[in-house]
């Protein structure tokens, strides 16, 4: 059974740039959620995808967008990066109707 | 905003001692979960307790839930140095498809 994998693991961007983070869900999982975790804080829900459709969104501006592909992998895109976007971005997969999440190791984004 | 709040924020104990962490939340829930996170890494699901359950065990873990007080506790018995991590409670807001995490308790187990 393959776990959740995320790429890249670390990246550095400058203010105003755009970034794409990628996630492969655990084998058999059809739901992907993205979370932002600032240093010293708990993860904050960005959005969830189920069957390639957005299935819920947290309190994040539209410059945070995502995609889910037919193989259930997913992307998180952030446009017009701001300094406060520096964080660990976590992807989690799950089975629909199940609330337990399986997390990847995260992508650490630093915005300078 | 965070739905849950853990306390204490940090806890340091000797190996072999028990560790207790508490979580309080604000709204009604279906389930409450506890997750563990090693420094800067992904979260690992530990245990889930449903709103109609009061206590649940898994290995060295014991979780309690008091819905009248909107609080939960996680007890780790006979702690080990490898238990050193941050522990988060997470709640679903009565059927919502996302989890709300607390701010975490950082546990240090001293060998």
Image: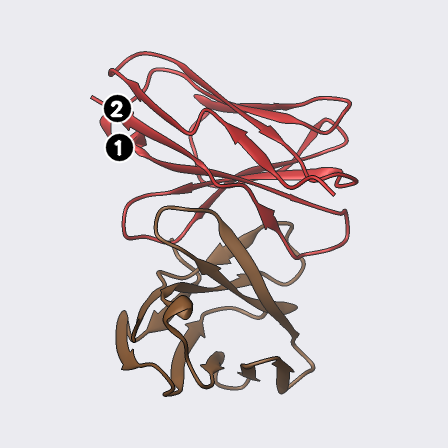
Chain colours: A red, B brown
Observer-nearest of B101 and B59: B59
Give the x, y percent position of residue A112: 20, 21
Q: Residues within 10 Å of mark 2 (few under 14, many from 20)?
A: some
Give the left or right position of residue A89, taking residue A69 as reference.
left
* Structural distance between the alpha carbons of marks 2 and 1: 8 Å
The image quarter containing residue B102 is bottom left
Q: How many marks?
A: 2
Give the x, y percent position of residue B63: 55, 81
Q: Dot 1: what SS?
A: helix
Let me know if marks 2 and 1 both belong to one chain. Answer: yes
The reply to whether discs 2 and 1 touch (Cβ–Cβ < 8 Å) is yes
Which tag, 2 or 1, sits closer to the chain's start?
1
Q: For the C terminus of chain B, give its image quadrant.
A: bottom left
Q: Which residue is mark 2?
A: A111
Question: Which is more foreground, mark 2 or mark 1?
Answer: 2
The image quarter containing residue A75 is top right
Circle 1 marks a residue in which chain?
Answer: A
Give the left or right position of residue B88, taking residue B15 as reference.
right
Can residue A89 be seen?
Answer: yes
The residue located at (73%, 55%) in the rendering is A98
The residue located at (43%, 49%) in the rendering is A43
Q: Residues within 10 Å of mark 1 (few under 14, many from 20)?
A: few
Q: Dot 2: what SS?
A: strand
The residue located at (63%, 83%) in the rendering is B57
A13 relative to B74, above or below: above
Label for residue A31? Answer: none
Q: Which residue is mark 1?
A: A84
A1 relative to B53, above or below: above
Circle 2 marks a residue in which chain?
Answer: A
A8 relative to B58, above or below: above
Q: What is the residue that sits farthest to the front in this orientation?
A: B111
């Amino acid at each position: 059974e393959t776990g959740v994998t995320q790429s890249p693991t670390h990246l550095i961007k400058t203010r105003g740039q755009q970034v794409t983070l990628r996630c492969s869900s655990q084998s058999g999982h059809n739901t992907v959620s993205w979370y932002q975790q600032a240093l010293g804080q708990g993860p904050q829900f960005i959005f969830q995808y189920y069957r390639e459709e957005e299935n819920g969104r947290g309190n994040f501006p539209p410059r945070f967008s995502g995609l889910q592909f037919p193989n259930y992998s997913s992307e998180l895109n952030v446009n017009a990066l701001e300094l406060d976007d520096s964080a660990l971005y976590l992807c989690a997969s799950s089975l629909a109707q199940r609330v337990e999440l399986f997390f990847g190791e995260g992508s650490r984004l630093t915005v300078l | 905003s965070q739905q849950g709040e853990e306390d204490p924020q940090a806890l340091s104990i000797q190996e072999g001692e028990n560790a207790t962490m508490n979580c309080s939340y604000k709204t009604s829930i279906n389930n409450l979960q506890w997750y563990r996170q090693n420094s800067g890494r992904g979260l690992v699901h530990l245990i889930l307790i449903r709103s109609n359950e009061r206590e649940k065990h898994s290995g060295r873990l014991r979780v309690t839930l008091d819905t009248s007080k909107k609080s939960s506790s996680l007890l780790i018995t006979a702690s080990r140095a490898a238990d050193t991590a941050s522990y988060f409670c997470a709640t679903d807001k009565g059927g919502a498809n996302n989890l709300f995490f607390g701010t975490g308790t950082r546990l240090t187990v001293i060998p």
